[in-house]
């Protein structure tokens, strides 16, 4: 039986051996499908034996993936879920029926990495992608939901031929890698649209819709505009932005039903109401505690933070915001979003990509933000708890890494 120390030792080796985009940024990004094709060939192309649902988009793809998985689980299907990044444990990336990937499987698969042919030099994401495919094949899942990592056209997951494809939305993010305009980014996202495979879109942007519908026509793929669907459903994911994601989920469920895949109405309702219970999904408007009311959210770009900050404003309470950002984010417009009557505590996320708040302190002063800088998350959280009043709100976010670090330190307390 593998012990925890062996597992942790090999996970550390994995992170140190292979560059990880989430941790180090652009230097770890390997666009293109050549490596993943070699990897899949080496492992016998496990993805070809799976019924896959491919979900991309700028924001909301993780929520949409988890909601869809929850509904399929409620319908009685053994459902695999591959998402990224993880918040606390690497194994969160690969789940079946809400359970993290087996420690033994991860450990054994890492050993195979050590013995790959020299002409295969995978990125971290390429290796975790083939790991997910192999795990889902070995466990004989009924369906596997695959979340796109970055972009779409050149993303490692784009080697698959799914039964359905969805693009939640397209907005500005990762411009240094995907393009500086909405059109350029939409072109990359549209790259997951496949020949004769239905595509469900949640975009409300006309420019984006033109690009997606054109690509769908070129691929003879049915185009479903999920924004036109009626949504009378509720979810335990209570961020206001989830209403848009639910429409994409409904589009996915409608198309699955057209394929004679049985999804009872009660399973749809219960699946949406029990996402966190069924899949272990955290970090999207997660209420961590009621006293003080503490909200966690991984929104990290302008589009996502604008929705989150608007919902915070609607609470009409004094806000305490613990925020940390990574290097490749344009913060100039994000600071304009911060609600008035907020006090902000800025930190550096505890990863190599983390941005030191002293670098943008001039912008904080220029925007007349009430702020303090802290050395780390623990100091900021402790200070906030000492200074927040009973009826005020504490929000923690700005980066996946800030939320992940907070959960790692406080989830078991």
Image: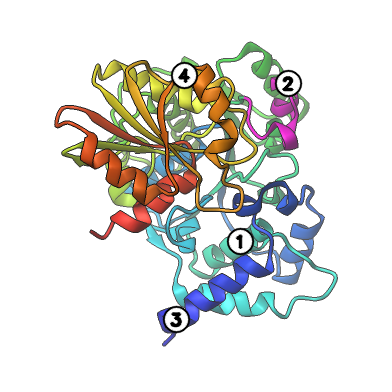
Q: Magenta stretch containing residue 357, yes or no?
A: no
Q: Secondary structure at mark 3?
A: helix
The quarter of the picture where residue 147 lies is top right
Q: CA distance from mark 3 to mark 1?
A: 20 Å
Q: Nearer the viewer, residue 32 or 413?
A: 413
Horizontal and vertical percent position of residue 17: 68, 69
Magenta stretch: dominant secondary structure: helix
Specify which label sits upstream in the sequence, 4 or 2: 2
Specify which label sits upstream in the sequence, 1 or 4: 1
Horizontal and vertical percent position of residue 251: 48, 28
Q: Which mark is residue 337?
A: 4
Q: Nearer the viewer, residue 157 or 74?
A: 157
Question: Residue extending furthest right?
Answer: 119
Q: Read off the residue under disc 1.
A: 128
Marks 3 and 1 close (CB-CB < 8 Å): no
> Is residue 78 depicted above or below 357 in this figure?
below
Q: Secondary structure at mark 1?
A: helix
Which residue is at a point 72% across and 80% down the rendered structure image?
Answer: 115
Q: Nearer the viewer, residue 111 or 165?
A: 111
> Is residue 97 depicted above or below 393 in this figure?
below
Residue numbers of the magenta segment: 172-187
Q: Read off the residue under disc 3.
A: 5
Question: Residue extending furthest bottom?
Answer: 1
Specify which label sits upstream in the sequence, 3 or 2: 3
């Amino acid at each position: 039986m593998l012990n925890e120390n062996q597992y942790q030792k090999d996970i550390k080796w994995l992170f140190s051996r292979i560059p990880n985009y989430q941790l180090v940024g652009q230097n770890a990004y390997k666009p293109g499908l050549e490596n993943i094709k070699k990897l899949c060939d080496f492992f016998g192309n496990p993805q070809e034996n799976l019924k896959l649902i491919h979900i991309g988009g700028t924001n909301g793809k993780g929520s949409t993936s988890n909601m869809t998985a929850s509904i399929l689980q409620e319908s009685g299907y053994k459902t695999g879920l591959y998402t990224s990044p993880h918040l606390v444990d690497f194994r969160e990336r690969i789940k079946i029926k809400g359970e993290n990937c087996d420690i033994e499987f991860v450990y054994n698969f890492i050993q195979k990495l050590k013995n790959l042919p020299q002409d295969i030099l995978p990125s971290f994401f390429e290796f975790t992608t083939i790991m997910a495919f192999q795990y889902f094949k070995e466990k004989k899942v009924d369906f596997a939901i695959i979340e796109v990592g970055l972009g779409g056209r050149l993303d490692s997951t784009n080697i698959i031929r799914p039964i359905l494809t969805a693009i939640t939305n397209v907005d500005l993010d990762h411009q240094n890698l995907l393009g500086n305009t909405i059109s350029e980014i939409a072109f990359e996202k549209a790259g997951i649209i496949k020949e004769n495979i239905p595509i469900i879109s949640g975009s409300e942007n006309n420019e984006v819709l033109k690009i997606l519908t054109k690509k769908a026509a070129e691929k003879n793929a049915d185009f479903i505009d999920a924004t036109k669907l009626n949504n009378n459903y509720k979810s335990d994911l209570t961020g206001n932005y989830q209403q848009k994601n639910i429409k994409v989920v409904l589009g996915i469920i409608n198309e699955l039903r057209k394929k004679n895949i049985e999804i009872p109405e009660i399973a749809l309702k219960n699946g949406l109401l029990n996402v966190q219970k069924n899949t272990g999904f955290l970090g999207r408007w997660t209420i961590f505690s009621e006293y003080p009311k503490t909200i966690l959210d991984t929104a990290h770009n302008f589009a996502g933070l604008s929705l989150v900050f608007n919902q915070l404003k609607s609470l009409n309470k004094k806000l305490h915001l613990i925020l940390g950002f990574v290097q490749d984010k344009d913060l100039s417009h994000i600071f304009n979003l911060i609600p008035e009557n907020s006090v902000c505590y800025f930190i550096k996320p505890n990863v190599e990509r983390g941005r030191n708040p002293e670098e943008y302190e001039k912008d904080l002063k220029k925007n007349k933000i009430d702020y303090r800088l802290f050395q780390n998350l623990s100091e900021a959280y402790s200070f906030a708890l000492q200074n927040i009043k009973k009826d005020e709100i504490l929000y923690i976010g700005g980066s996946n890494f800030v939320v992940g670090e907070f959960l790692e330190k406080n989830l078991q307390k």
